[in-house]
Every structure is written in C-alpha cells, then in structure tokens.
Image (cartoon, rainbow, N blue to C red):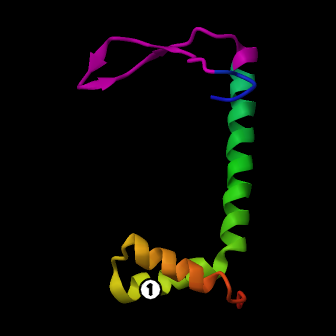
Amino acid sequence: MSEKLGPLTFGQKEASVFLGRNVSTKRDFSNQVALEIDLEVKRVVSENYALAKRVLTEQMASVRALAEALLEKEVLNAAEIDQIILESSSQPVLA
C-alpha cells in the first residue's frame, strides 16, 4: 500500500491451474496505471534501501559486535542482544 496508489489490488488472478501453479494474471488496468505502479514500486524500494543503508551505517558498531558474538555462540537470546547493542552503541566505529 502506498499513499499514491492506496490500498488497491491490481490484476485479477485466473482460476486456471496448470501443474499445481497459477499460470496467469488478467490485467485489468491501463498502461498509464502500470507505469504509475512501476514508479511507485521503484520509489518505495529506493527509499527503503536508502533507509536500511543509513541505519546499518549509523549502527555499524552494533552490527559488527552482533556478528562477532554470533560467530562465537551462534545463538543469542534477547537479553544478550540488548546487552551487546547497549555496550557497542557507546563505542566509536572503526572503519
């Protein structure tokens, strides 16, 4: 769902099944709407990629500390994760 397109579904699934798979979708929208969908999907993906990259970059010390702890233990519980993040967030990131 996006603010531009709203909570809509585009395209109708066909009921025909071939080898257990749904093989076709009926297109019930114009080329202009298809273009708007493509642009909106691109915008959502690009914005969220940038957000994820920024968060990971800003929290690199925590990411590295968690990776090191997972290499040692393989499994961490919530309390261990919280402690690692708390401890690593006060440390400077070494590139």
Answer few, some or many: residues within 10 Å of disc 1's Cα (few below 14, many 20 plus, some between 14 and 19). some
The quarter of the rendered structure image containing the C terminus is bottom right
- Whole-percent x, y for residue 84 in the image: 51, 82
Q: Residue at x 67, y 21 (%)?
A: 6
The quarter of the rendered structure image containing the N terminus is top right
- Whole-percent x, y for residue 8 in the image: 60, 17
* Residue that numbered label 1 is attached to: 69
43 w.r.t. 17: above or below:
below
4 w.r.t. 88: above or below:
above
Q: Which residues are magenta?
A: 7-33
Label 1 is placed on what type of residue? Ala
38 w.r.t. 59: above or below:
above
Quarter location, residue 49? bottom right
Local SS, label 1: helix
The foreground one among 71 and 91 is 91
**Left or right for 78, reference 34:** left
